[in-house]
Amino acid sequence: MNTFFLGLIAVATVVMAVVQVGMVVIVLRLARRVDSLSTQVERELRPLAAKLGLAAENLQRATALATGQIERLDRLFAGASTRADATMSLVQSAVIGPLREGLAVVAALRGVIGAVRAFKGSRAAKAAARLDDEDPLFIG
């Protein structure tokens, strides 16, 4: 019986050794396939990485150009705004100054006409007042 158990242990040990050797062979094949697959992925992704790098450079260059154009437009609009303000103040001073002077002349003429009317009116009022003063004294 001992021999039977000893034989059984030997057979189990051989089976375990065969299974372990099989597992090592499978793991080695799997390692080779993973290595082959990683090499293939690396080879296929290398051009994609180069294209992505080129695209990033182009995007950076386009961003720099757009920033320059925006700054140029900002300077252009700032200059145009300054020139428009200067033009408006020049037009305002050219129009408002003479207009004020013209209004001052009109106001002076109104004052003179008013004074002449008041002077004529005061003479007529004095004459009327003289007549009014004499009428109440008249008995008759």
Image: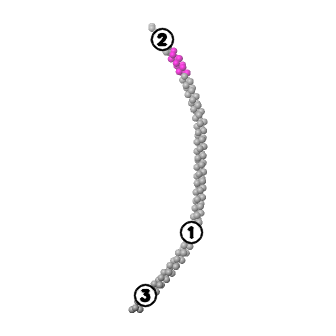
Query: Which badge, 2 or 1, is on the more N-terminal residue?
Result: 1
Q: Mark 2 against mark 3, which lies toward the viewer?
A: 3
Front residue of this view, candidates 99 and 60: 60
**Image position, residue 23 (x, y; %):** 48, 81
Q: Please state which amino acid type lies under the numbered disc 3.
A: Ile
**Residue at point 58%, 68% (across, down):** 46
Residue position marked by numbered label 1 in the rendering: 45
Residue position marked by numbered label 2 in the rendering: 134
Q: Please state which amino acid type lies under the numbered disc 1.
A: Leu
Secondary structure of the residue carrying numbered label 2: helix
* Above or below 7: residue 39: above
Secondary structure of the residue carrying numbered label 1: helix
Q: What's the magenta region?
A: 116-127
Q: What is the spatial separation of the Cα atoms under label 3 and label 1, in whole angstroms?
A: 53 Å
Q: Is residue 69 left or right of residue 128?
A: right
Q: What is the spatial separation of the Cα atoms under label 2 and label 3, in whole angstroms?
A: 167 Å
Mark sitting on residue 9: 3
Quarter of the image for the N terminus: give it. Answer: bottom left
C-beta proximity under 8 Å, tags 2 and 3: no
Say how the picture is coloured: one colour
Q: Please state which amino acid type lies under the numbered disc 2.
A: Glu
Q: What is the spatial separation of the Cα atoms under label 2 and label 1, in whole angstroms?
A: 127 Å
Decide whether residue 120 is among the magenta residues. yes
Front residue of this view, candidates 5 and 99: 5
**Image position, residue 100 (x, y; %):** 57, 32
**Residue at point 50%, 78% (across, down):** 27
Secondary structure of the residue carrying numbered label 3: helix
Q: Residues within 10 Å of mark 2 (few under 14, many from 20)?
A: few
